[in-house]
Amino acid sequence: MAGKPKLHYFNGRGRMESIRWLLAAAGVEFEEKFIKTPEDLEKLRNDGSLMFQQVPMVEIDGMKLVQTRAILNYIATKYNLNGKDMKERALIEVYTEGVADLCEMIMPLPLCPPDQKDAKIALIKDRTTNRYFPAYEKVLKSHGQDYLVGNRLSRADIHLVELLYYVEELDPSLISNFPLLKALKTRISNLPTVKKFLQPGSQRKPPADEKHIEEARKIFKF
């Protein structure tokens, strides 16, 4: 019997959090090997574990997988969260890439210089309410089904709901005009595997604070 997937990253959200979400939603137990010092990262590099010298890295099924989207794609395919055919997979990729676009705007916010932060937040709010949320709301309205693709749970739903939580942390009012997105968030959050992941004490990581940022700075030397 194969062991649990082992996640190599620092003890924070970053690019590993969507992997944690997807594994948890699939009901897969996983272990975490936290990188705590620059030396820990250097050891992984020196022993050949990191193809491109960077994390996230996930040990799964005898492989040491790197590159976040490749890892997510493998997990989603392995646990039947990637659609039933090529057309569904294409739609899932489209919706997932949209989520990634907005996440890429939100993720660096804790590192943003104070004099630029208000402008960045204003741009995120504009893109959220005028570009991304209307697009997903339209998809859900167009077919009237419970999930984004094929009327069954896929990685697109999980990634989108993870994003909805991040947006809610930024400004809870941003979702108020999107009832179908609100319903999707409630529906996915009530799935037993996701509900467990959302409970205090789970492997879900909190928003970055100064301590997390300083720890990441030391490890990754940025």
Image: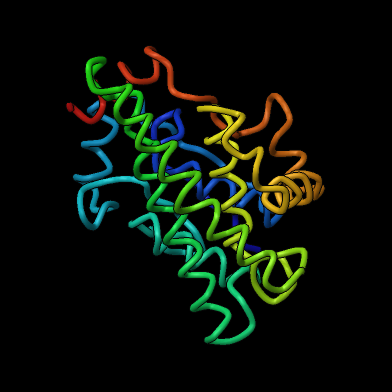
Q: Which of 52 and 100 is in front in this view?
A: 100
16 up-or-down from 169: above or below: below
In-image side of 92 versus 151 (left or right): left
13 up-or-down from 2: above or below: above
> How far across and down, in percent of the image, does residue 114 sit?
26, 15
Q: Nearer the viewer, residue 58 or 165?
A: 165
Residue visible at 49% across and 41% down in the picture: 17
Residue visible at 59% across and 34% down in the picture: 204
In-image side of 42 versus 77 (left or right): left
Toward which corner of the image does residue 115 lie, by quadrant? top left
124 up-or-down from 102: above or below: above
Which quarter of the rendering shows the C terminus?
top left
> How far across and down, in percent of the image, does residue 80 sit?
65, 72
Which quarter of the rendering shows the N terminus?
bottom right
In-image side of 119 versus 3 (left or right): left
Q: Which of 209 and 157 is in front in this view?
A: 157
Toward which corner of the image does residue 42 lie, by quadrant? top left
> How far across and down, in percent of the image, does residue 198 sit?
70, 35
What colouring does the structure picture have? Answer: rainbow
Residue visible at 31% across and 31% down in the picture: 120
207 up-or-down from 184: above or below: above
How many badges with numbers are in the image? 0
